[in-house]
Image: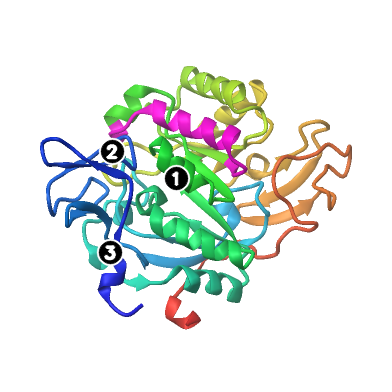
Amino acid sequence: MSSMDDTVVSTKYWHQLDNGQIQCDVCPRHCRLREGQRGLCYVRQRLDDEVKLVSYGRSSGFCIDPIEKKPLNHFYPGSSVLSFGTAGCNLACKFCQNWDMSKSREMDTLADRASPQHLADAAITSGCKSVAFTYNDPIIFLEYAIDVATACREVGVSTVAVTAGYVDPKPRAQFFSEMDAANVDLKAFSERFYHKICGGHLASVLETLQYIKHETDTWLEITTLLIPEENDSDKELHAMCDWVVNHLGTEVPMHFTAFHPDWKMRDIPSTSATTLRRARKIAIEHGVRFPYTGNVHDVTGSSTYCHRCSALLIERDWYQLGRWGLTDAGRCASCEALIAGHFDAAPGTFGPTRIPIQMQNFR
């Protein structure tokens, strides 16, 4: 890249309003912008009478992670993934666990740079099976994410979107057509929670989940961060699991993860392991085949079991894999039931290590 101008690119999801403002059409927030004004996401700005992405090719940091950290438990377990994010977000979650990046209003946060081809090459060089758009929501930088996905696909590297799924139909279709896997953050199962705590709406996220599952080939998993007294009641968990089974099916993995006090919700206690295990039990009662606990040490809750014979298929101790009970055809070695997901003949061997990297080392 030759200049900072490379980081400002034109976009197509917007339209002119009669009052002279321009409306951004990437997400249901539909920010209406005057010249020079940025949307809530902060990285989409009205410049020269159009909406431009002003963070193309820039990142808040790169890291090699285990794929289970995304979390994805049924997408090439044990493999490594090259992870990165940018700045900004199109939701306003008071409990954000990555607030230093997603809530950033300082472009200086984006200290590292990489072209799509550079990222694809770095993934190959570092032995990563996939590249993940994570830490903040890739929907807000979808032009960059899509270009990265295209470059990765050309060299046989998969792409993973870690997203809240808060996106309008047209950009949603383009974005997920390029993604090999997605973990969608279903933050709660009440409109009250989405409106009061996230500044969004539940219905749009449910539409995204159904679209991914039924209209794309993107592998889908769901994560819900359980917050004490906010979204962890039996009633809400029963309603959520019932909806997932009836609208997405029994094979979509559900991850129930632990909240820790952060951002604007520092007065709420961390989620207990007991709460996560209760949520997992409720999911099992509704027929969810692959429910998981996360952010706590729970070998049973983080491991994968056969839905037919209950055999241990993939043992997980934090992000370290143990016993492997799958055949090279992705079936249970005990009863030959086909297990939903994407699996290699043998598990990956990356392990639990998280490795921050500098992209200039891969040039």
Task: Name the foreground residue: 137 vs 352.
Answer: 137
Type of amino acid at the residue the image marks with label 3: Val
Q: How is the image coloured?
A: rainbow
The span from disc 1 to disc 3 (Cα, nearest Å) is: 23 Å
Residue 106 on image: x %, y %: 21, 61
Tell me, yes or no, whether the highlighted magenta stretch contains residue 216.
Answer: yes
Horizontally, residue 163 falls left or right of residue 120, namely left
| Residues packed near mark 3 inside 10 Å, few (<14), some (14 to 19) or many (20 plus) | some
Distance Cα–Cα, label 2 vs label 3: 39 Å
Q: Is residue 61 above or below residue 362?
A: above
- Mark 2 burial class by Cα count in 10 Å: few <14, some 14-19, many 20+: few
Name the residue: 40% across, 26% down: 203
Circles 2 and 1, Cβ within 8 Å, touching? The answer is no
Q: Nearer the viewer, mark 2 or mark 3?
A: 3
Left/right placement of residue 130 relative to residue 198 reads right
Q: Which residue is mark 2?
A: 267
**Is 297 one of the magenta-colored residues?**
no
Q: How many marks?
A: 3
**Segment colored magenta:** 197-220
Residue 282, percent across and down? 59, 23
| Residue beneath disc 1 | 163
Disc number for residue 8: 3
In the rendered structure, which disc, 1 or 3, sits on the residue that comes first in sequence?
3
What amino acid is labelled 2 in the image?
Asp
Task: Tell me the residue at 44%/25% (across/down).
Answer: 189
Decide: is 12 above or below 274. Answer: below
What SS does tag 2 mark? loop
Secondary structure of the residue carrying tag 3 is: loop
